Image (spheres, rainbow, N blue to C red):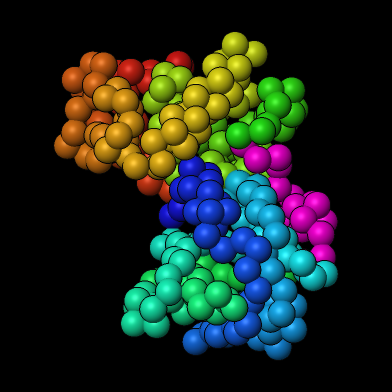
Amino acid sequence: MPELPEVEGYKIYIDHTALHKKIIAFECSDNRLLKSTKTDFERHLIGYEFTETKRIGKYLFIKTSGDKTLVMHFGMTGRPNYYKEKEDRPKFGHIVLSFENGFHFAFENKRKFGWWNLTDSIQIYKTERNLSDDARDLSLEDFKTSLNLRKTFIKAVLMDQSVAAGVGNWMADEILYQAQVHPMKKVSDMNAQDIERVFNTMKNVIEVAIANDAHHLDFPEDFLIHRRKEGETCFHTNADIQKIKVGGRSTYFSPKWQVLDI
């Protein structure tokens, strides 16, 4: 699933392709991908332009020259595609905008878990969905406050979008591996130094991922992402990487590197 670094890349892509171009047509082959009616999308997009993008976690907001802001969530396989020739339309481009300049913008969505919505206010949308500030912008104090009354496992808490918007499964595993914290360590057992270390590591993982365009093969050699499967060995200890379930999600870690204090 696209997480914060991937969606940041999509934001940059859209900034360099689809802004400030008049929309002349809207097409959607499956209305289940729309959180508002197709008529609403046509009314609030056709004749207008995209003017600015903003990302909060895994959500991408695209302001228009009209009254509404477009909300994109990329689900499991969503991605943007800006192209000119109709024959270049991607196979799974289920939503397509056409621009006055002759180009098109497709929302690729193979597994159809991604979707579009419309909102009057990014701030209201953020509040209604209980999103924290974007994890890239999150302050240490706000992070500490969010963890203050938590008693469950740190892995599950990191993936809570009200705590660190944008952090998903692979990122949470990487953060805890780099911070040398066991994914089943309870937040209530963590001291201030533990929490600050996780926070600082989160910030580093985010920046490394964005700097490398979320292309995992280019991440530093000591990143778990290169060995994030059973049968692989830990970069630091050569111990086997293990897989467990935490908060219902598959979780990979190195038991000799990320020791669970008892």
Highlighted magenta segment, given as a residue range? 119-135
Above or below, 176 relative to 215: above
Whole-percent x and y of residue 77?
Answer: 41, 63
Using the rendered image of the protein, determine whether residue 109 is visible from the camera's viewpoint.
Answer: no
Residue furthest top as drawn: 193
Q: Residue at x 74, y 84 (%)?
A: 43
Q: Is residue 129 magenta?
A: yes
Whole-percent x and y of residue 113?
Answer: 49, 69
Image quarter of residue 180: top left
In this rendering, would 58 be left or right of 223? right
In this rendering, would 228 be left or right of 156? left
Using the rendered image of the protein, determine whether residue 14 is visible from the camera's viewpoint.
Answer: yes
Of 42 and 209, which appears nearest the observer? 42
Above or below, 77 relative to 96: above
Whole-percent x and y of residue 80?
Answer: 47, 63
Image quarter of residue 162: top right
Q: Residue at x 64, y 13 (%)?
A: 192
